[in-house]
Image (cartoon, rainbow, N blue to C red):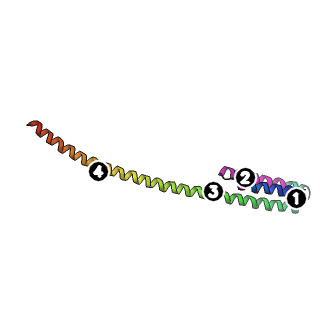
Amino acid sequence: MGKVQEEIATRISLDSVQAVGSLKGLKDAIKATNNEWKAQEIALKNSGDYLGAAKVKYEGLSNVIKIQKQSIAELETRQRGLINVNEETARTFEKYNAEITKTRQEMSSLDTSVSSSKQKYDELEKN
């Protein structure tokens, strides 16, 4: 019966790991898996099954490592996303900067035209 419980618990852990995608979910899965194998280990030790306890600990730690690897992969994916956002933000910044420079040049040209037009207007007004 203990073997069946171990197998069920292990399958539940692995199934929940596959279903989890968020970082919080992964952290929760790590904590739950740790608690699970530790409780099973204590129960097996209390019943005198030290071999079973060692096996549960080994399998539990292995499952935690698998979940931690998923957590690292998720963090790396998010980190790459931030890099893309930063690169995209930098491109957008440069685009806006170029538009600002172009607009300032056009404004300077318009200022020159306005000055020239005002001067002509003032001359015509005097006559």
User: Mark 1 or 3 closer to N-term?
Assistant: 1
* Residue 98: % across, % down: 36, 53
Labelled pair 1, 2 in contact (Cβ < 8 Å):
no
Compute the Cα span from label 2 to label 3: 14 Å
Let me know if residue 24 appears in the view: yes
Compute the Cα span from label 1 to label 2: 22 Å
How many other residues sit within 10 Å of disc 4, few (<14), some (14-19) or many (≥20)? few
Disc 1 residue type (three-letter): Lys
> Magenta stretch?
17-40
Q: Main secondary structure of the magenta part?
A: helix
User: Mark 1 or 2 closer to N-term?
Assistant: 1
Q: Quadrant of residue 91?
A: bottom left
Horizontally, residue 79 falls left or right of residue 106, namely right
Task: Name the residue at 40% across, 54% down.
Answer: 94
* Residue 126: % across, % down: 9, 36
User: Circle 2 is placed at which residue position?
Assistant: 29
Task: Name the residue at 72% across, 55% down.
Answer: 17
User: Circle 1 is placed at which residue position?
Assistant: 3
* Residue 113: % across, % down: 21, 46
Residue 105 - label: 4
Disc 3 residue type (three-letter): Glu
| Quarter of the rendering occupied by the N terminus | bottom right
User: Circle 3 is placed at which residue position?
Assistant: 74
User: Mark 4 or 3 closer to N-term?
Assistant: 3
Disc 4 residue type (three-letter): Gln
Labelled pair 2, 3 in contact (Cβ < 8 Å):
no
User: Mark 2 or 3 closer to N-term?
Assistant: 2
